[in-house]
Image (cartoon, rainbow, N blue to C red):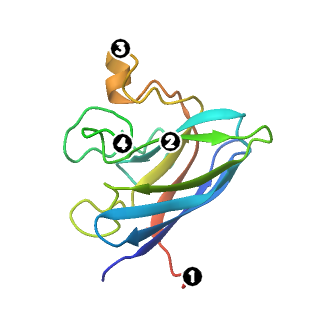
Amino acid sequence: MEVTKAICVLKGPGSVTGTIRLKAEGGHSTSVAGEISGLTPGKHGFHVHTFGDISKGCGSTGSHYNPCNETHGAPQDKKRHVGDLGNIEADENGTARVEMVDRLLRLAGKYSIIGRTMVVNEKEDDLGKGGNKESLESGNHGAGVAWGIIGIDEDPQ
């Protein structure tokens, strides 16, 4: 089955909730769109993690999805984890509107993200530019505040 649309419903232990829809675009890109509310105003790291296991919250999702064994980086960097989606920014009301196209995310094939977990973090991701080991692994983004398993979307829109 060729997957062309996916959905991720995000929830955290607090008030952060949201829905993200993904759509395979022509060529090698995937659009990512949605809205997340209940955040503190400002930037928050946004990633796809390796496992679709949320049995222990964000703690069981593994590290950023990195099948090519790269260092952490920004979405536009040549070398980065597949799961590195940079930052989203919440407005003064705590709502982040997400609209991006990513060149590495796949909904089908060898590097599919279906069944993996999407995570929103408490702090801004330094995009691997923080000058320390943790920066090159995760971006110093702090704990997860919301997460959800990426699943196949049946929505015909």
Name the amino acid type tagged 4: Gln
Residue at mark 1: 157
Q: Is residue 114 visible?
A: no
* Gap in angstroms between the C-alphas marked 2 and 1: 30 Å
Q: Earlier in the sequence, mark 3 or mark 1?
A: 3
Left or right of 114, for residue 111: left
For residue 3, what is the image quadrant?
A: bottom left
Quick one: label 4, few (<14), some, or many (20+) residues within 10 Å?
few
Name the residue tied to disc 4.
76
Quick one: label 3 or label 2, which is nearer the N terminus?
A: 2
Residue 29 shown left or right of residue 149 in the figure: left
Precedes in sequence: disc 4 or disc 1: 4
- The amino acid type of the residue labelled 2 equals Cys
Mark 2, mark 4: which one is toward the viewer? 4
Query: Looking at the picture, how far across and down is residue 55, in whole percent?
Result: 49, 49
Check whether the beta carbons of the residues at disc 2 and disc 4 lie within 8 A of each other.
Answer: no
Label 2, secondary structure: give it. Answer: strand
The residue pinned by badge 3 equals 131
| Residue 135, picture quadrant | top left
